[in-house]
Each structure stands twice: as structure tokens, then as C-alpha cells.
Amino acid sequence: MQDFDVIILGAGAAGLMCALRAGQRGKRVLLLDHAEAAGKKILISGGGRCNFTNTGCVPDRFLSANPHFARSALARYTQHDFIALVRKHRIAFHEKTLGQLFCDGSAREIVGMLLSECAAAHVDLRLNHRILGVTRAERFRVETDRGSFGAASVVLATGGLSIPKMGATGLSHDIARQFGLAMAEARPALVPLTFADQTLELMRPLSGLALDSIARCGRAAFREAMLFTHRGLSGPAILQASSYWREGEAITLDLLPDRDATALLLAGKRARPKAEPKTVLSELVPQRLAQSLAAAHLPPRVIGEVGDKDLTRLGALLKAWRLTPSGTEGYAKAEVTLGGVDTAALDQKTMMAKTVPGLFVIGEAADVTGWLGGYNFQWAWSSGWVAAEAV
Ligand code: FDA
């Protein structure tokens, strides 16, 4: 059996960061993954350009049963620390919107950077290893289909359940349960919402249409683009709202942010009484949507003959369209997994299990989920870093 100081399970964002920092601290690090390549989710992230952090990363952009849990790690390894690393490697980047930083070139540069830091820190990276089990006597023992390894510390970094096709598994959750750690219920998040019946009939022909909107779910509100799909709704505003949505609840959409829809419709009626309602409406929202809303909510007359009451009702709908999703597109399409290892079981300064000395949980495997916009990678970097300081 080969022996190490620390064995990290999962060579994704969090595992790579943890490995490189532990290696820099002089630890003998083994980084194991069942995939044929490290950082596969980084490669597909941000449309291939990796939204690697957010300049406005603050703890209230994260969901967790304990909203304060992420504070310590985020403060100890900040977005500025990661940006400094990116600069050190001369990777060109830009801010797209809302503080979101993307590579100018390719996400491959971020994976290349992490791998070269790991190599410089003498991390032993082994891919294509199937992990069969983890046990603990005096030290931890990790069994794989290619041999067994021992270490004083084990870091669970195999992420969440999102995108099984990319190799996501519940391994970290299973091992955490095996060691008696509590779990927060896992569910898909940052995920498209699905609709049924008449609502879907109305949405389906609009598939592909995007518009600026405010999506609200409970007290959360996100102003970004939304997109109609053949199954319902997607786009950044909807993905953000999905993390707050629960079965049976409604979401509310403002399709005309910053504008008074009713006043505009009534003004349109006075100015052009002979126009069709869909023509006036199409000056406010995209034509296809105007057509379908007019057909569904207004009588088939010129706008001058449509009652103010009907226009006021449509104006109210444009500002607060209440819709109840039938579900989500699930882990197959979810960018992240909400829930995971309960933060109450972990020390927030080190990510170590309170009841199992030497066992750490980092990244998406823990119950900390960021908003869309680089927050999830920042959590992976920050949690990976603080664990590496403690292994
Ligand atoms: P991650 O999933 O990165 O890594 C887990 C590793 O464990 C993988 O290498 C996997 O192969 C390995 N593994 C899993 N099961 C195993 C097993 N049984 N045995 C051995 N190894 C196993 N976030 C963001 O901030 N900006 C962005 O631009 C995007 N974009 C984005 C796009 C898409 C399509 C998705 C699906 C997700 C994003 N995200 C994102 C989210 C981000 O990718 C995610 O939060 C982080 O990758 C989580 O990092 P982890 O290291 O925790 O898990």
C-alpha cells in the first residue's frame, strides 16, 4: 500500500485547488479521479470560456442551510487571490457582466494553470481510478480498482450529482454518510424549469425567444435574460430563480422591467386606435410573444375597441406573470446540486468533519451553492484552499 499525507478524491475545481495548495505546503498529495481527464466541468463551463470567479463575490450570494457557513473560507481565499493566480499565469480575461470574469481564450487555460501548479507542487495525479471504498483505522485507507492507498487525511471533492453524463456521482455523499455525517437534501439547481398543459402550449411556439426580465421566486429576484424553451423556461434569470424554487410554488416574471406596461398599452390605444393589439404590444415585447399574449388575453378587435380594463389586466400580467412550473429538467441539465453534506457537520474554517478528524469535504459536495456567475467556482477554490491549509 502506497502512503501519502493526504488523498483527495476528485480532480475537479475544488480537488485541484486543494491538491496544489497542500503540495505547496510540502504535503505528499495523491489526487484520484475516475475520469480520463482532470477538470472536465471547468472545460465546459461558461460556454468553454470558464466564468472562473466574480469580482462581487460576497457570502449572501450563496445558498446553504447555514447562510454564514461560507463566510470564513471566502474571506481567507478570495476572488482577488484567484485573480492574482490567473494573472500570474498570464491568462487574459474580461468582465462580461455583473462582475463575471471569463477567459478571453479558453477554459483549457484554467485547467492548464491548475495542472501546472499541481505538477510544480509534486502532486501525484492519478486518473482512471475507480474508487471502491474508504475505511479508517489509525489512518485512512482508500481502495481503488488499481490498488490501495493510505493517508492521514482524506478530502471528499467529487462534487455533486449534476450532469451524470459528465461523470458526476454521489460518491462524496455516500462516504460522508458512511462516516455518520448528516446530509442536507440534494436537489438540482441552476436548472431550466418545465411547464405543463396550457402554459406549455403557450410557451412551446416561443422556443428560442429571449428577453430581459425579472424572475422572482419568494423573496429572491433576478434581473437577467430569460429564454423560452420547448419544455418551458431557461436563461440566467430563470436558472437563478430555480435555486430558490420548490415543487408547487409559483414564480413571477416581470417582462417589462423599469417600464409601466399598463400606461404604455393605454397610451398606444389612444395614439393608434386602429392598430391591432399585437402590433402595439410588439413595440414592448418581442413580436412572437406579443402575438401569443394578444391572442390569449385580448379580444380580436382593433386596440381602440379593446376596453381599458382588458389592457390594464394585460399590463398587470406583463409586470407580474405568475406561473407554476411542473418541475425542473433535473440533474441532466442542472449546473449545480443544492444540498449535500450538512455544513453543521463541518468546521467552517477548515472544512473538516467535526466528528471524523482528518476527513474533509470541499466544493459542491458540501451544502453550499452559489448563484450563477462564477460563484460556484469561487466556492470550490476557497473551500479547497482552506482545507489544504489544514490537512
Ligand atoms: P467537480 O464536479 O468540478 O469535480 C468533481 C470531480 O470528481 C470530477 O473530476 C469527477 O470526475 C470526479 N468524480 C466524481 N465522482 C467520482 C467517483 N465516483 N470516483 C472518482 N472521481 C469522481 N460554475 C462557475 O462558477 N462558473 C461557470 O462558468 C460554471 N459553468 C458551468 C457549466 C456547466 C455546464 C456546469 C455543469 C457547471 C458549471 N458551473 C460553473 C458549476 C461548477 O462547474 C461546479 O460548481 C464546480 O465544478 C464544482 O467543483 P467541484 O470540484 O466540487 O466538483
Image (cartoon, rainbow, N blue to C red):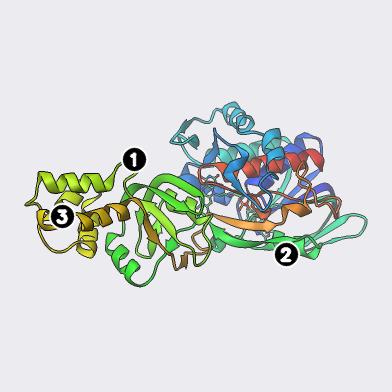
Distance in Å between CA atoms under marks 3 and 2? 57 Å
Q: Position of residue 69 (x, y in %)?
A: 70, 45
Look at label 3 and name its amino acid.
Pro
Q: Which residue is mark 1?
A: 258
- Is 269 left, or right, of 63 in this rendering? left
Cβ at disc 3 under 8 Å from ligand 1: no
The residue beneath circle 3 is 277
Say which amino acid is labelled 2. Answer: Asp
Q: Quadrant of the C terminus?
A: top right
323 lies left or right of 344:
left
* Left or right of residue 340: residue 217: left
Q: Secondary structure at mark 3?
A: helix
Badge 2, how many Cα within 10 Å: few under 14, some, many 20+?
Answer: some
Front in this rendered view, residue 353 or 314: 314
In this rendering, would 120 be left or right of 214?
right
Discs 2, 1 touching: Cβ within 8 Å: no
Judge whether 303 appears above or below 260 on screen: below
